[in-house]
Image: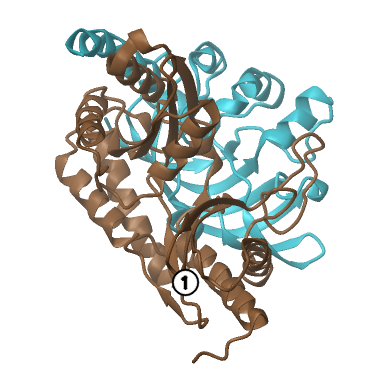
Chain colours: A brown, B cyan
Amino acid sequence: MSTVTITDLEAAVEDAAAHLYVWALKDIPQDLREALADAATRETSVPGQRVLQTILKNVNVAESEKNLVCQDTGIAVYTCRVGEHFPLHPARIYAALKAGTERATIEHPLRSNAVHTITRENTGPNTGYRLPIVHWEFIPDWDGLDVKCVPKGSGSENMSFLKMCVPADGVKGVKKFVLESIVEAGGKPCPPGIVGVGIGGSADYAMYLAKEAIARPVGTRNADPHVAKLEEELYELLNETGIGPMGLGGDVTVLQCHVEHADTHMTLNPVAVNYQCWAARRASAHVAANGEVEFDREF
Amino acid sequence: MAAVRMHFPASEEAIRDLRAGDEVTVDGHIIGIRDRTQIRIFDQGIAPPMDLTGAFLLHTAPGVRKLGPGKYEKICIGTTTSARMVRFTEGLGEQYGVRAICGKGGLPDEAIEPMQRLGMVYFAIVGGAAALETTQIEEIEEVAWEELMPECLWKFRVKDFGPLTVGIDSHGNSLFHDVQERAQAKLEELYERL
């Protein structure tokens, strides 16, 4: 039997958060490295190829210099899957994630981006009122915790779009809106990245789902075959726009398009787009009920 | 599309030689600047305490460590989205003699005319490639307006800074304008296929 105390468990989650934040910023996941290398084999434009080669070089320099891939440490976003029997209450999990974010920011040190939205005064070491942002999912019949840290840069977050399509617009309306959003975004969100699309639910939930979509490993497909088909179609269409790497023109505009969905009202057809830059940083950990932490990038 | 090596500060003549699409590598001194820095210069009317004649401006808010009064060490220096700051383009060239603006993601079409008239260029850097960019910055030589941290005025000495792509030249050409024009036409074609 485990003798772990609640205090130990809270400390384990805090340590995990501090590690995940810095790890995500420095070492991008293997699936993303492969997607970027694959993009470089397909790109035929001269500026596009120059951009992709520089990106690949930068990923290696970050590793050899032990530096951050990108200077924008973002806003810290975590997704938590909490087992019904995990001994630490979500209120304490949140406190631990906040403390871990602060510690990582001060100890590294990382650039602190958090400001009050009206006064623009800095509010803390990448924390503040309702920062970090946490997405919660609760899992029945389980005693573990999965934490994923997704530092979200502002260049790509500024390229977020929402439209309340009507049912008569159908899937065609959804596709049209995603296409026009990505063309409008141009080079600003650091393409080629991951286009996250949320459909259904409500206005706010569609955007929440779009954020879930960008946090998935590159090229994973939605379990619903209708949604997976939409992902494939959007991926092909978006890469025909010619926006190209950093918006300088080319064949590779997006690395992937991920779609998450929720059932919705018969009169609703919301579509939200959330962009994730090519530096699609992501790092994850499993925390067991006994406080053991396993770092894992496969989710 | 030529591959060009340049030193900054630079002359108007050197800028006029560049054409959209050229690949450029930069040595010399560049000035870091961002939203709040330019709001202070133009909206509050406070002249920058650094000479910007012939300057290369980089859209950045660097990650740094303070070593002592006015002395900073680089940690991670990268480049931010330029489009937010387009309205300052004309003033930078006309009032302060700036020659180059460098950032990521491009400047909207309203930058084309002042750049052509005043002899300025926009350099597109690879956004997010901060680890590499940091190795090309040799030293932070000067910092002004520290109270705007990290959106101060920074003077960096750089070597082999790049690769940069001339996104907007001083002859009325913009790669971003061309890409958008082609993409808009392509969208019409794609909509037909949906």
Residue B174 in sight from this viewpoint: no
Residue B189 image position (x, y, % from top left): 21, 9
Residue position marked by numbered label 1 in the rendering: A143
Identify the residue at image location x=56%, y=14%.
B114
Quadrant of the image occupied by residue A47: top left
Q: Secondary structure at mark 1?
A: loop
Residue type beneath disc 1: Asp
Identify the residue at image location x=34%, y=19%.
A174
Residue A201 image position (x, y, % from top left): 46, 29
Residue A17 image position (x, y, % from top left): 56, 67
* Nearer to me, A271 or B98: A271
**Rendered view: B185 above or below A177:** above
* Nearer to me, A197 or B93: A197
In the image, B148: left or right of B5?
right
Residue A265 in sight from this viewpoint: yes
* Nearer to me, A73 or A135: A135
Residue A198 image position (x, y, % from top left): 41, 32
